[in-house]
Amino acid sequence: MKLSRREFLVFGGGVAGALATVSAPGPVRRLLPPRRRFWFQKATTAVPTVCEMCLWRCGAVAQVAEGRLWKLDGHPENPKSNGRLCARGLGGVGELYDPDRLKKPLIRTGRRGEGQFRETNWDEALDVTAKALLKIKEDHGPEAVAFFGHYAGDKWFVDYLAPAFGSPNAAKPAVALCTTPREVASNLTFGRPVGGHEPVDWDHTRYIILLGTHIGENAHNTMMQQFAAARARGAKVVVVDPRFSTVASKADRYLPIKPGTDTALLLAWMHYIIVNQHYDAEYVARYTEGFEQLVEHVRPFTPEWAARITDLPAEIIADVAKDLCRYRPQAVLVPGRHVVWYGNDTQRMRALYLVNILLGNYGRRGGWYIAESPYVEEYPLQPFPIGSEAGGCAGPAASGPEASSDRKPRADGAGRTFLRGGVAIQELVEPMITGRPYPIKGLVSYAVNLFHTLPVRERTAEALRALDFHVAVDILPQEHTRWADVVLPECTYLERYDDLITVPHKTPFIALRQPVVEPMHDSRPGWWIARELGIRLGLEQYYPWKTIEEYLEQRLNSVGLTLEEMKKQGVSVQKGRPYLEDWEGKGSPFRTESKKIQIYCKELAEAGIDPLPRYEPTPEPPEGFFRLLYGRAPMHTFGRTQNNPVLTRLMRENEVWLNRAVAAAMRMTDGQRVMLVNQDGAKSGPVRVRVTARIRKDCVYLVHGFGHNAPGLRRAHGRGASDTALQTRYALDPISGGAGLRVNFVRLEPEA
Ligand code: MGD
Ligand code: SF4
């Protein structure tokens, strides 16, 4: 949550006081000076920057010599890295030197999808792009061009170019297909988002519950460090997951829940805590409203009721609830990250928050801290014709602004409306195909591999075929670039500046991404591409800054920093207000209308939706099919790293996990190659079977991101199976617009 200028001044005691909270400028204390290192017999220079191998954005220090990057380390002063990087962060060198990178701008010569292009120069590529986008604007209006983006550089396209151009149709899969439900649920309940860095107070917590969050396989550097430290300190861990994940092997209790039934478990925990009067009554009375309605609501949801639904013994459900109360408020249910599961996900997330609230842990040591964004001003631009609120992984639901256009395809044209501005990214595909409620004819895609991101691939292909124009900005010849009319090669995060990385945190901070080497090939940074395009689109007035250095300098000066200082230190940490006592006499941290935590959600009631969470069953797998579950591997990020020469060595392809007893009954053996076929006949594979006791009998599991079908990715092409190819259905969450992807079922066929 960003502080307003006024709050910042109150909080910091005026500008001088405020600046005193910012870490002193100067070189980072522990950044090693140039010297010889054992792995490289020449002197290297340490250049601080920010990792972008995933969205966690750790501070990194690049060791550079003779214009070449030799090694990446964790930035010692950056709170996200704490001196370390994860395997993927270290593997950033592989992304930079991947020989398969896009090297020059390309113009399509064959049919869309064929991947036939000719090389060109930047002037021609940008002129062709601008001409096509202007033609669409003239014929159909600015909203007929959609902007999809991901990662830090999408700021220049989705948050800047789209609203300057006048299109509300800007969306981010990182939100709509990932965190949307938890952010919307958090805003409805607390009046503030969770934010990109989950605000768990790991330093003090004593009891941790993970529902479907596989820390360690889902590798977020500092979260893993803090989890390990908490465990070493003796914190108890409970893992609820249909699969015995790596973190389950570190847990005190493992609950192999039936997929799709977590809300029932959460309701039973609320029932137990309330009926036994173990909740934090003082906290509930002081900070919340709607508790009485919750008492009535959860009365029927006994542990025995939940046991029948979840496949978990009632005594264990009750035992865990008892433990939660024993350790409260230093007991915490961790919000997951990729939480679009079954289409009722905002309600599940609300249920998770409500258990936390009964424990009185929000804003308390060992529970959730209150995360705030660092104070730094935006670059002073004249207002765009429409606002921008697309948000990042941490932001609100993917959306365009309300103000601009009543022609915006809110919801899906079928009459469903999402609360809180959710335009589900996959729903923007519909107007590309049908022209309803109005046509979308152009697409600017930045760092989004649409074929690995959006469910229902056939429809994605149909939409791309129907477009008048598609420009893709990427670093690799991924699947979707084969469907573009113009491909613009961006340089990697190690060769460019991006906008300031501003992180809501216990100690909010600003970090600088800067180039550690010159851009390779004929690639250019995103800010430059977007600006050049903007100027060709007649939007000069929105680009008063000529260089990125000028832009960054202006923003940094607003907090008394200079670019020169930040280039040396890489990070600037401010003081936060993590606990409720820090807010005494300074207003409420809860930004709901009542300034209290909304247990009973009036906004939902007014929209005709259950104001308190309810369990809704999800369809069962048909005979002979398994529910398709998917997740992450610590050495890969989504669909972007499977070609990385370093990371490929750690994991070359995925496997399909199959329960041992089921495998025996099916006469399947470990390592056997199979095809996966879903309920609609879609196929993926071949992929090896991993026979294991670590998964329930009713589901199978894949690591997401594999199964590339892009010959230009020479290491990744044709390896493993794609879960996306098997997701021909999704369940749309009516509150957030998030697309639940775990509603698909597969059977296994031996490879022919
Ligand atoms: P990636 O798969 O990482 O992210 O989906 P995407 O947003 O598509 O692919 C990103 C693209 O960015 C790649 O083409 C890569 O080459 C390119 N790229 C990498 N670095 C740069 C750069 O510096 N500049 C440019 N211009 N391009 C770059 C992720 C999305 O997918 C998310 S966030 C989630 S949580 C969902 N996860 C998910 C899942 O687990 N399973 C299934 N089936 N679908 C999912 N969809 C969602
Ligand atoms: Fe990079 Fe790993 Fe940090 Fe992600 S968690 S930003 S990949 S070091």
Image (cartoon, rainbow, N blue to C red):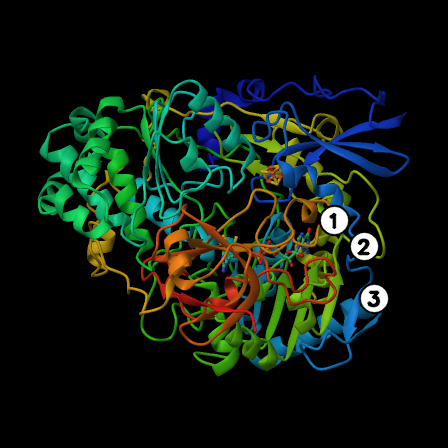
| Residue 104 image position (x, y, % from top left) | 82, 62
Which class describes the residues within 10 Å of circle 1: few (<14), some (14-19), or many (20+)?
many
The first of marks 1 and 2 along the sequence is 2
The N terminus lies in quadrant: top left
Q: Is residue 669 above or below residue 573?
A: below
Q: Residue placed at 76% from the left, 20% from the top? A: 32
Q: Are marks 3 and 2 in contact (CB under 8 Å)?
A: no
Amino acid, disc 2: Pro
Q: At numbered mark 1, what does the secondary structure look like: helix, strand or loop?
A: loop
Q: Residue placed at 18% from the left, 35% from the top? A: 318
The first of marks 3 and 2 along the sequence is 2
Residue that carries the numbered disc 1 in the rendered image: 645
Q: Are marks 1 and 2 in contact (CB under 8 Å)?
A: yes
Residue that carries the numbered disc 2 in the rendered image: 99
Q: Is residue 345 above or below residue 330?
A: below
Q: Nearer the viewer, mark 1 or mark 3?
A: 1
Residue that carries the numbered disc 3 in the rendered image: 123
| Mark 2 C-beta closer than 8 Å to ligand 1 | no
Amino acid, disc 1: Pro
